[in-house]
Structure formats: structure tokens, C-alpha cells
Image (cartoon, rainbow, N blue to C red):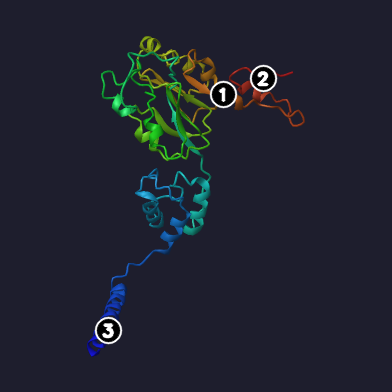
């Protein structure tokens, strides 16, 4: 009986001793937690998509708290999360423009020619390994095998008629589809861009027209139509200077193949307030399209 009691006493003493040692060790080796890191982490959505460029939301929270990342670095959270983090960090948030993934290819099954019928893994990267880098005659176009769809955690991408299609309502601009695309067809752009180029085939026009009905043929009509010198031609493709572009959409209206898309549904038209107009005719003289007359 005495042996049992002695064993219990020894075990109890050892338990107390170990508890004391653990308590001391916890204080000695304690790692101080930055309260801002905890607060910022609570604001982040927790998708751990890596779109911010940091190893998950924990990594981003630490970077923001340390001043190494901006308060709007989370593409998933957007402006709402940036505002919350701004209050924690004592920083005013600037109005940000929502970005979405943008597919720079319109070569659907009907419009784009094929070299052969691809039979294999439904992966764009695998298709790039075969001769010709995929079945499409255009070596710059979307392969339509869905590597971007597999990479998207938000169900914002689908393959329709042989090319990728983005749902702007679901897209959070995490950038995973951009990384997954071996053709570099996808990029992140402001959602409200009024004019976009839907082709990246840097080839002579006759080669492009043989491969795709909607490809840019380098005719330079868009450049000639632009009254604001916002378009230059580089590698047979138009490059739009967003600083100079006034969203007149004349380039899209002039493009013979439809390679330049314009948001005509939201095209802005000047309206004159007759009560305020003094008849100076400055608008008539400055309009580069002769769209205004003075009566």
C-alpha cells in the first residue's frame, strides 16, 4: 500500500515539476505576437490563393503589418478589405479600380483554323509539347483546353466554343489563370476598359488572315482613325496609350476584322445644356470629328 502511495506522490511531484519547467520555458522562449498582424489577418478572406504574391494570407498579413505590402494587396478582398486594413494601419485608402482577367484571343472554333485534331490530355501545357504547340493554326491563340479553368478557385472561367471565357462577376483578379496560361493569352486589366485588343498574333497580316477570321492584320486603319495619337503599331499590332485614349472607340469602329473590341453600349456622347451654353462655338472648333455644328 505504501508503495502505491509513494508512486502517486512521485508522479504528482514530477507533474508539478514539469508544469513549472514548461511555464518557465514558455515565458523565456515566448515569441511576441504583433497585434496588427492578428488584426490584419482577421480582415483577409483566407483563400490563400497566392494572388498577392505572398505565401498565403498569413504571409500577406505579416507583410502589410511590416509596411512591406500595400493595404490593397489582396486581390480577392478588394476595396472593402483594403478599407478595413487601412483603419488598422492608420492609412487612408485610395479609390481602386477593379481588375479582372482578360482573354486576348477571340479565335473561336468557327473563326480560327486548325492544323490537326488534338487527342490527348486536356491540358494546355501538355498540348504545347506536341508539334505546332497545339491544334490551332495560330501559334499565339488560346488553346481552349482549360488549364486556366483548373487553376481558378472561384469558378470564374469556362471554355466556350474553343476559347476561355471570364465571368467578371466571379473573377477576383488573383492572377492564377495568368500564371497557368502557357500562351500568355490572359492578363489582368481594369474591368472598365472601353477598348481592348482581342489578338496577340505578331505576324504579317496575310499569315494572320489565313489562320483566323478575327485576327489583327496590321492594316493600321485604327491608327489612322485615332485623332489623339493614342495608337502606335509595334510588331504588327496596335498598342493603345491609355493616357492619350479618350474612349472615342473610333479604332474599334474602324477595325475591319473586329480584332479591337469597343464597349459601344456604354459609349459616351456629349450633351449640350441649352440653358448654360453661351454660343462661343469653342466645342465646335475643338471637336476633331466635326460632330458639332453651330446654329
The extreme right residue here reads 275
In the image, what residue occupies the spot 46% across and 18% down?
259
Say if 126 sits above or below 77 in the image: above
Tag of residue 248: 1
Crowdedness near tag 1: few (<14), some (14–19) or many (≥20) residues, C-alpha within 10 Å: some
Sequence-wise, which precedes: disc 1 or disc 3? 3
Spatial separation of the CA atoms under disc 2 and disc 3: 101 Å
Tell me residue 138's x, y (percent): 35, 17
Sequence-wise, which precedes: disc 1 or disc 2? 1
Q: Quadrant of residue 236?
A: top left
Q: Nearer the viewer, mark 2 or mark 3?
A: 3
The extreme left residue here reads 3
Tell me residue 276's x, y (percent): 74, 32
Crowdedness near tag 2: few (<14), some (14–19) or many (≥20) residues, C-alpha within 10 Å: some
In the image, what residue occupies the spot 39% across and 32% down?
148
Tell me residue 84's x, y (percent): 51, 54
The residue to which callout 3 is attached is 8
The residue to which callout 2 is attached is 292
Q: Work out whether residue 238 or residue 217 is closer to the camera in this orientation and state it.
A: 217
Mark 2 vs 3: CB contact within 8 A: no
In the image, what residue occupies the spot 71% across and 27% down?
272
- Quadrant assignment for the C terminus: top right
Say if 25 sits above or below 206 in the image: below
Q: Nearer the viewer, mark 1 or mark 3?
A: 3
Spatial separation of the CA atoms under disc 1 and disc 3: 88 Å
Mark 1 vs 3: CB contact within 8 A: no
Left or right for 227, reference 4: right
- Quadrant assignment for the N terminus: bottom left
Q: Work out whether residue 191 or residue 159 is closer to the camera in this orientation and state it.
A: 159
Amino acid at each position: 500500500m505504501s508503495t502505491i502511495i509513494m508512486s502517486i506522490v512521485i508522479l504528482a511531484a514530477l507533474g508539478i515539476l514539469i508544469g513549472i519547467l514548461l511555464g518557465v520555458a514558455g515565458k523565456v522562449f515566448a515569441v511576441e505576437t504583433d497585434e496588427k498582424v492578428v488584426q490584419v489577418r482577421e480582415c483577409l478572406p483566407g483563400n490563400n490563393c497566392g494572388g498577392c504574391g505572398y505565401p498565403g494570407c498569413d504571409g500577406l498579413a505579416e507583410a502589410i503589418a511590416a509596411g512591406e505590402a500595400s493595404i490593397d494587396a489582396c486581390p480577392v478582398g478588394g476595396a472593402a478589405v483594403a478599407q478595413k486594413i487601412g483603419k488598422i494601419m492608420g492609412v487612408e485608402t485610395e479609390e481602386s479600380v477593379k481588375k479582372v482577367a482578360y482573354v486576348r484571343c477571340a479565335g473561336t472554333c468557327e473563326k480560327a483554323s486548325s492544323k490537326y485534331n488534338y487527342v490527348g490530355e486536356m491540358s494546355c501545357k501538355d498540348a504545347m509539347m506536341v508539334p505546332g504547340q497545339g491544334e490551332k493554326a495560330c501559334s499565339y491563340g488560346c488553346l481552349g483546353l482549360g488549364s486556366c479553368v483548373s487553376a481558378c478557385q472561384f469558378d470564374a472561367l469556362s471554355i466556350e466554343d474553343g476559347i476561355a471565357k471570364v465571368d467578371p462577376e466571379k473573377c477576383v483578379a488573383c492572377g492564377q489563370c495568368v500564371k497557368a496560361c502557357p500562351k500568355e493569352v490572359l492578363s489582368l486589366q481594369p474591368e472598365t476598359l472601353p477598348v481592348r485588343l482581342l489578338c496577340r498574333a505578331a505576324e504579317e497580316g496575310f499569315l494572320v488572315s489565313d489562320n483566323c477570321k478575327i485576327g489583327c492584320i496590321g492594316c493600321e486603319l485604327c491608327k489612322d482613325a485615332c485623332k489623339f495619337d493614342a495608337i502606335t503599331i509595334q510588331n504588327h499590332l496596335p498598342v493603345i496609350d491609355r493616357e492619350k485614349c479618350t474612349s472615342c472607340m473610333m479604332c474599334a469602329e474602324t477595325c475591319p476584322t473586329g480584332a479591337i473590341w469597343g464597349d459601344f453600349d456604354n459609349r459616351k456622347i456629349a450633351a449640350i445644356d441649352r440653358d448654360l451654353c453661351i454660343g462661343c462655338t469653342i466645342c465646335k472648333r475643338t471637336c476633331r470629328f466635326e460632330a458639332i455644328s453651330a446654329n
